[in-house]
Image: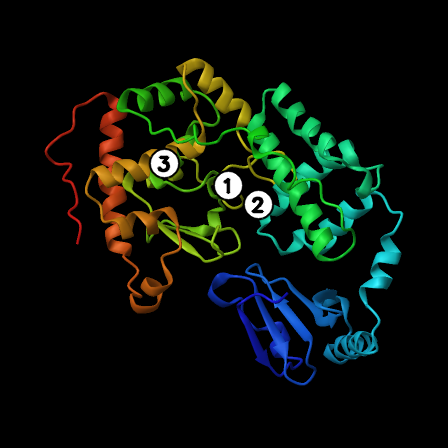
Amino acid sequence: MLQKRDRRITFTARNVSTLPALGGRRTDYRDALTPGFTLRVSPTGARSFAIVYRHGARVRRLTLGDLDAFRDLAQARELARAKLRQAAHGDDPQDAKRAAVRGKTFADLCARFQAEVIPSFRPATRVGWSRYLEREIVPAFGPRKPEEISRADVRAFVREFQRRGSPISGNRAYEVLRRVFRWAVEEEITSHNPCPLVTTNLLANEAEREAVFTDEQLRAVFTAAEGMTVEPFFRLIAYTAARSGEVRSAQWSEIDFDQKLWTIPGEKAKNGKAHPIPLSSGAVALLTARRTVAGPVFPADSAEGYMQKPNRAAQRLSKATGFPVRPHDLRRTVATRLAEMKIAPIVIELILGHELPELQRTYNVYGYLPEMRAALEAWAVRLDRILSGQSQGADVVPMVRP
């Protein structure tokens, strides 16, 4: 069914390419000329045509294809009208799609998911989900038909990750598998979905991943990281509280040294909106020391051209320090320390790149950039003192909440 964020509008050759995702969230538009003909716009800019129709007592949705799959709007509207006429005569337009996939393997289903759904995700999410599909899910289930995959199979799949010592990856792989099945059921490709019936206590408990480092632990982390290639990566997270994926994929074109500002593009930000991060003196010094002409800040010999998830490095740091070390722990630590310094909650949320409540977004359009800059500069001074083993000086003044 259509999402709550739907709008009725007359589609034109121009507006189907420019209509926005309202509020940075997936939005469905309904064509005023052809009732039941819709355009779905994702926050990443992906666009697809569909029809919404009634068959029996149920309201159903059939995706017709991406915007680029049609010669023009007239072709898409003509196909929509033909399918809607089918539904009006009592036939189900989904029947042809089900017949086309009947007898296909789960690998075929995953290939369709990659072609039709994954392109609408943010770049970092596309890479991660494709990797789980290609390296874990398809090798495990690919040759079988979707209906042949049981709850026991899914449980064994997750437990294999636990046996290998990567239970959190098992959680992520399960989420991708669950989403593929849910999509297939929504598209009425299959009615079988073994994932929701798998008990959640099978999954690893991630509540333990809420560590906040003490001063001693921060020193231990960066002492252990000294000389490692990931040291600047962890240090930039510590200075900016940016997400691991945002730091790994950072490009020099995003960084304005004159303004001391790093702007994360909307297509990379978690909420789909450009996210400015003021750079403290420590962050600027770090970036200046590794500045190159162009390309990624953390280049690597990978398909994306930038640093992959530093899982092995994190394991080495964890072994060296005697406690778990994860990039997100640093981000959480910065947020907690800013709160300890009496930084206003709204400033911390903006530093973290979180989306503010709708009422605040509507009535308060002030960006708080000066406050963000002052907070991160004060934190950088405090962090440098912590890492050098110095006591906190009187010049590190907690910032009062407005």
Disc with the residue nearer the chain's start (1 vs 2): 2
Query: Residue at the location (31% across, 39% down)?
Result: 335
Identify which residue, 313 or 78, lies in the foreground: 78
55 lies above or below 212? below
Q: Secondary structure at mark 2?
A: helix
Instruction: Report crowding for label 2: few under 14, some 14 to 19, many 20 or more residues within 10 A (C-alpha).
Output: some
Q: CA distance from mark 3 to mark 1?
A: 15 Å
Give the residue at mark 2: 124
Q: CA distance from mark 1 to mark 2?
A: 7 Å
Identify which residue, 84 or 14, lies in the foreground: 84
Give the residue at mark 3: 332
Residue 103: where, in percent of width, then height? 89, 47
Residue type at the position of mark 1: Gly
Instruction: Report crowding for label 1: few under 14, some 14 to 19, many 20 or more residues within 10 A (C-alpha).
Output: some
| Horizontal side of residue 229 vs 300, given as left or right | left
Residue 218: where, in percent of width, then height? 32, 24
Identify which residue, 214 or 235, lies in the foreground: 214
Q: Which of the 4 image quadrants contains residue 241? A: top left
Query: What colour-coding does the image apply?
Result: rainbow
Contact flag, marks 3 and 2 (Cβ < 8 Å) = no
Give the residue at mark 1: 245
Note whether residue 233 is visible. no
Residue 284: where, in percent of width, then height? 34, 41
